Amino acid sequence: MVFRKVPSYIVKGRASYQLQRGVPSDCQAQVGKKKWKEPGGKTLNEARARVPGFIARTDLEIRQARGEQLTPEERLIQQGPLPGFGAGDLVDMGAPHVGQYLDDGTPNPQYEELLATAQLVQEGKARELLSAEGLLQARRLDREPSPRTFEGWSRALEAFMAFTTKARPFNCTRADAEAYKEHLLNRMGRSSAKTQLAYLAGLWTTLLAKQGGGEHIFKGLPGKLDETTKSKAQRASTAQRFKVFEPSSPWDSWEGSVYVPVFQLMYFTGCRLAEIAGLRAVDIHDDFISVEWTEDRALKTANSVRDIPLHPLLVPVVEPLRQVTGDIWPSLRSYKQVQGVEVVRWGHNLSKPCKQITGLRPKDFRDRVIGQLRSNGFNDTLIQRLSGHSAVTINSSYGGADWDSYCRMIHSLK
């Protein structure tokens, strides 16, 4: 499975749901139990909504049991509202070492942030500070991403928190985000750095929604890493339109692997490698193949769901594949756990044999098909739909699939 049928920490009872989490063995003596249990509500959605707070509360107990120092914000929220006191009084009691002003007489940003938190506490709006794990789970439940996207979020947040050495995402500042942007630029290209910041910006949007306050420290940062004129010019000089994506030998002469049909299907469909590697026998019909979302094969986007006409030359190739039960190539599937979520990948070990046998990388097949269709003069919107890309204009999102055009497009491939 890509995701567990019931998300982590949620257990189904007879008439309702319950939240459960095991207490780490080194904390059981201090906590006084081996497992935390809380009511989760009558519906699955209600239980999901309670998961982030449950994680935050139990994380706090773990830190206390281990004798770790709590942040001033955590102490304020744990203390709760105090009738008859102002927000400034709470800050003075919870963080007496934090002054209102810096040595040069300017307001202390840390004090201002604590004052804002204290105000939320007094108004009853402050919530438990999410841990990195709690934030990931909250974002996952809100967005229901593909497993690979969730893996990207997890890696980006883990790297950022390690860079800042802060205990909680809420404790990170805009200065941390700016410094991390420079750190990324020293380690990777602008496009890769922009992707990491975009992941983090999305996570911080969820953080503010769940915490009820704070600063969006990544707001606007991904946009600052748009391509420079220099990089655009360099990319244009080696643009793919000037490359030739042709195999080193005819497609019907490929041999040396049981996965040759995977390469041949990519050759005549332009599908992504994972879309072909994860095919089931029921996905291959008389004159088309179906790319569907399944529990064992998540797709890149919703636009990836589509039917693709079967090229006449592929008929003898797919005939024996129809006789298989279930997944056609189950050995091309691999699993790993990321923050309690099972991430599945398809075909990641085929890149090298693909290059050796065909002379092309898996991505090259996709470039080849799209390039041929453009050269043959087909409508760009139809090309986008057939290749599983999103529409680029409002007008292109209207109208149904033009199946006859799709057939002509596929049959034109050589």
Image (cartoon, rainbow, N blue to C red):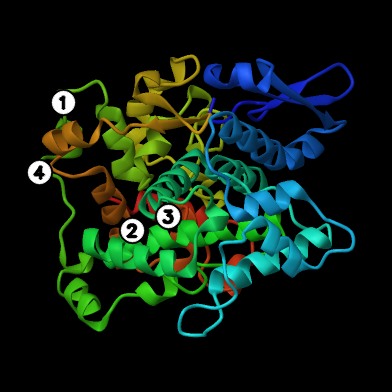
* Mark 3 vs 2, N-terminal side: 2
Judged by depth in the image, the label closer to the viewer, 4 or 3, is: 4
> What label sits on residue 255 in the rendered view?
1
Residue behind mark 2? 370
Q: Is 395 located above or below residue 387 in the figure?
A: below
Would you identify the image quadrant in which residue 46 lies? top right
- Identified at 35% across, 73% down, the residue is 225
Q: Quick one: SS at disc 4? A: loop
* Mark 4 vs 3, N-terminal side: 4
**Cβ–Cβ under 8 Å for marks 4 and 3:** no
**Cβ–Cβ under 8 Å for marks 1 and 4:** no
Q: Amino acid at mark 1?
A: Glu
Q: CA distance from mark 3 to mark 2?
A: 14 Å
Across and down, in percent, residue 69 comes to 54, 43
Q: Quick one: SS at disc 2? A: helix
Q: CA distance from mark 1 to mark 4?
A: 13 Å
* Mark 1 vs 2, N-terminal side: 1
Residue behind mark 3? 408
Q: Amino acid at mark 3?
A: Arg
Would you identify the image quadrant in which residue 398 lies? bottom right
Q: Quadrant of the N terminus?
A: top right
